[in-house]
Image (tube, helix red, strand yellow):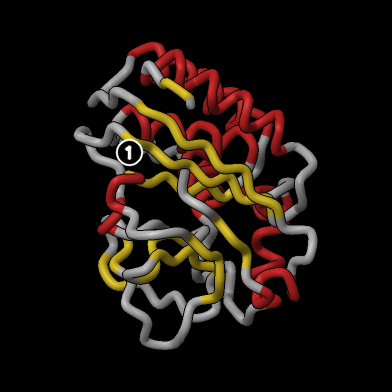
């Protein structure tokens, strides 16, 4: 297992921060019809019940945004990924279909509002520490190029940043070849709710990725 620690930089602004880590062996696939039925069912219900201007006030999204503000980052310019996903479906824009492991993580983010990082654990070098991004720090965000992570919470391994609530990094991203998966569910609102979302995530992983947990 990869060891994960939280820096005082984060705990000073978010003393209640908690993280749930899931590491497992998986068989990833390009598409899973049962998973996408669940995604579409949830999206239909969410869109019917949620207006665009209420998304940034949803539990877990709100607390992540507040942490951004305390670190000096504008959450409207650099939206947490869970908020961006929710806004996407409410605006009627279809979700990207990437791979079963990634699509599964996106469903959990949509459903619970947590910032969730998903990584190919074999590409992580050393242990992880959650700190704060620095000016001009190199970070190639997945599908969007260089991201200004100054003021963003960022997980780093021995080589540099791999994940923020806004985007993860290309170097450690999940691919169809990923067999060793690490998921980090970040509770900027504290530990309440993390056991429930962890159990749900493991259920999805078992059902759709044939996950094996040590």
Image position of 127 (left or right of 33): right
Where does label 1 land, which residue?
96
| x and y, in percent, of residue 134 in the image | 47, 84
Q: Residue at x 48, y 24 (%)?
A: 213
Vertical order, 48 against 158 (above or below) = above
**In this rendering, does residue 35 appear at all?**
yes
| x and y, in percent, of residue 53 in the image | 66, 52
Q: Residue at x 71, y 66 (%)?
A: 66
Quarter of the view holding residue 151: bottom right
Closer-to-camera residue (15/24): 24
**In this rendering, does residue 94 appear at all?**
no
Q: Residue at x 42, y 18 (%)?
A: 35
| x and y, in percent, of residue 22 in the image | 52, 37
Q: Residue at x 73, y 53 (%)?
A: 57
Quarter of the view holding residue 30: top left
| x and y, in percent, of residue 167 in the image | 42, 58
Image position of 10 (left or right of 126): right
Closer-to-camera residue (132/100): 132
Vertical order, 102 against 208 (above or below) = below
Closer-to-camera residue (134/34): 134
């Amino acid at each position: 297992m990869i060891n994960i620690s939280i820096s005082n930089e984060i705990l000073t602004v978010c003393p209640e921060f908690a993280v749930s880590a899931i590491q497992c062996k998986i068989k990833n696939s390009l598409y899973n019809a049962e998973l996408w039925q669940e995604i579409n069912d949830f999206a239909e219900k969410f869109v019917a019940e949620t207006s665009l201007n209420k998304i940034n006030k949803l539990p877990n999204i709100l607390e992540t945004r507040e942490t951004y503000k305390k670190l000096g980052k504008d959450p409207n310019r650099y939206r947490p990924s869970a908020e961006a996903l929710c806004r996407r479906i409410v605006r009627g824009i279809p979700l990207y279909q990437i791979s079963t492991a990634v699509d599964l993580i996106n469903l959990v983010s949509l459903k619970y509002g947590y910032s969730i990082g998903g990584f190919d654990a074999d590409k992580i070098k050393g242990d992880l520490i959650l700190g704060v991004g620095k000016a001009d720090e190199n970070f190639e965000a997945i599908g969007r190029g260089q991201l200004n992570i100054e003021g963003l919470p960022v997980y780093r391994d021995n080589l540099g940043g791999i994940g923020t609530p806004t985007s993860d990094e290309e170097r450690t991203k999940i691919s169809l070849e990923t067999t060793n998966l690490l998921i980090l569910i970040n509770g900027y609102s504290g530990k309440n709710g993390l056991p429930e979302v962890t159990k749900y995530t493991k259920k999805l992983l078992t059902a759709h990725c044939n996950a094996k947990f040590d």
